Image (tube, grey):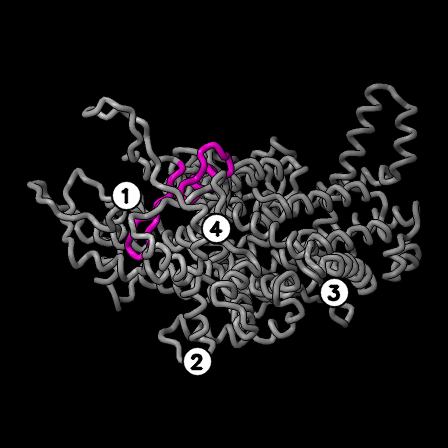
Amino acid sequence: MAEGLEKAETIAAWEGAYKHYVPMFREDIEFGGGGGVGAAASKRATGSEKQAVNILSNILLQREAAIGQAESNRVKVSLYGLALSNPNPDFWATIRPASQAKQIAQDLQRMGVDPAVAEAGMQGVPTIRTVDPMTNQVVDRVNPMYKSLPGAMTLKVNGEVRVLMFNEKDERAMRMVAALKGTDGLTNFDLASSAVGKTTRWLAAVNTQYNPAFGVVNFVRDTLGGAINLTSTALRGQSLRLLGQVPQAMAGIAEALRGEPASEWGKAFAQFQADGGQTGFREMFKSSGDRAAKVEQQLALLEKGGRLTPANAARVTLKLLDDFNTVMENAVRLSAYKLALDKGISRPEAARLARELTVDFNRKGRTGRELGPLYAFLNASLQGTERTIRALRGPDGGKIIAGGLAMGVVQALWLAMAGFDDDDLQEFTKARAFIVPLPGGDKKYVAIPLPLGLHVLPNTGRVLTELVIGDHKDAGKKIFDAVGEIAGAINPLGGGNVFTMDGALRTVAPTIADPFIELGFNKNFAGSQIEKDPVGGDKDARPGYARARESTLRSTTGQAYLGISKALNWLSGGSGHEAGMVSPTPERVRYIAQTAGGGVLRELEKIINVSTAAARGEEVRASQVPLFSRFGGRVDEDRVAQSRYFDNVRRLERTENTLNAAKKAGDGEFMGRLLQDRPEAALIQLGNSAQSEVAKLNKLAVSTVGDREALAQIDQARLGRMRALNDAVRALELASDGPTLAQRIRGEGGQAMGAE
């Protein structure tokens, strides 16, 4: 039914209006593309003495508006046909067009509607009661404004205006018509076109659309998630075939993006796009002035075409990255689309199934449309959560839940048997990937990204298993982190663990404010410290560059950030021993730069650092390799030692502060209980000594920037002091409580006791 109606209103018919009307857009007049579907598709020239402005941009605006109206009309015609097939005067009614009864019957039959059924829902044009000035009698006349009533939705069938009237007394009916007419906005602010909206869109694009690492990671997530979500569709049981077709789909998409496709899969992607299977972004313009600025920008690029300029190089690079991510994002969808067509499913239904297989970015409600410019991934999170719930409620939902939890149990046991400690890998990494330990005993691993949303299941199973086999002293923190991770996964506003202060603030605040929150709490999105804590807290008056990390001092790009940090300190009145008004650490400078540059800058920095390190013959760590580091590597023992050292120092400082407070209060009984409950108190003096020596080595490292051999010796001395404290704390724990089940699985309990 809908396909026959859609043919009546083609884009070509709308564009044909330009043959009869020659618009001369005048200044002081903004042309918005017509007054809706029921109005004329173009503006007819009537003559004017005002100067014509922005002719080209207004023609483009009119064309885009006409195309938009035509596509909107397709939806409305389908709904009109639904109303004809399902008459319900209490909800909606179709207005009888000004046609002969025979013509109406033919139209209904062509649309696949039984005239006898539709006749019950057909109504005449709404009337208003008034007084006839000639007869002075009360009469009912056609309401001249009925097409503009809040409950009226106008559309065209074969060029004839028709109206679908919604019952203004029905709240659901009025919500529907308001959404279809685009009058259901929550606010009157154009957030999408504001500086906030543009910044949010850039932050999202630079970390996804233009980030090659994200494209590959997201490809794995979408492919695995699509295979699981397929169980709740008409293609249930075809997951292996879906995965097998993905390489062909990738090749077809790449071919179609390069030009006119010739292969079967290339043509299938072109048809997939025509059927609305690909989600996308449409740039909107508030006025012809904005459109004119964009046109001038494009014309300027055309003038420079073929020239090797920085702007052209950047544009070509971003276009290549965009095409690359298009291939990655649509491969599994195209595979599902082709699979559905082969099964005999109609093209529109196959496109819908494929589009909704992962995250349908085109679907959004009123809230998503209004709040999207504030929260970068709001709609994607909402749609992803809804799709996950749909899969879990499907016929194989129980198997998916059981399999996901079992995967987490296997993950925890596998890591323990391979010799991995709980803190060898960051929680952020373990929560979002399935870690496969590699043989060899050197803690190498492969990380398989898990589908977002569904990753909650294996993460829950893993954490519960770690609680059983691990150190119960940290049980409360592990449960807290796990529940926070689950809540963060289903939280549409993002922000991570909503039960932490920084996570709660990131959740409530718009995306544009997240960098300021992370800088304030000195934690990035993965929970890692942005910069080292100052020695002595706020009393540390050293300039920011003097507190640089050793990893920053060693890296090539780190030298650039170090130089910026020194320059800012000097320009703001600082010196070599005192911080100026603006004296950020190099790590803060890097964080700000990478926030603006996103994944593109992060991967570019890795390429530079790896290339220069390899050229100097230095060891290249797995975490430094571009892209590869997202899919595996080897545990960085130095990073783990540093992380444990700072955790132990903070733990000892808390115990020391509590003892000092009890001593000051004269509570000897409490001090005795504390010393018994916290045997690490015996290591307080050792911890203070370690901090003092590490602080001296840090100062010495800053003064030897550029001397790589000296820096390497300082690093080894610093790590040796940190490991000494870590070993003392672990030996004390084993002596007090004995080895945990995880430690016994790793076979280290007896060794640690013997070492002690």
Q: Which residue is drawn at 42% across and 50% down?
A: 80
Residue under numbered circle 3: 443
Q: What is the crowding at mark 2: few (fewer than 14 residues within 10 Å), some, or many (at least 20)?
A: few
Mark 2 residue element: loop
* Residue 442 image position (x, y, % from top left): 75, 67
Q: Which residue is drawn at 39% across and 62% down?
A: 110
Q: Which of marks 2 and 4 is in front?
A: 2
Q: Is residue 27 above or below residue 255?
A: above
- Disc 4 marks a residue whose amino acid type is Ala
Point out the tag, 2 or 4, that comes first from the N-terminus.
Answer: 4
Residue under numbered circle 1: 35
How far, Cα to Cα, is label 2 from label 1? 43 Å
- Disc 2 marks a residue whose amino acid type is Ser
How far, Cα to Cα, is label 2 from label 4? 33 Å
Q: Residue 711 carries which label?
A: none
Q: In this view, does 710 lie above or below 333?
A: above
Residue under numbered circle 4: 204
How far, Cα to Cα, is label 4 from label 1? 33 Å
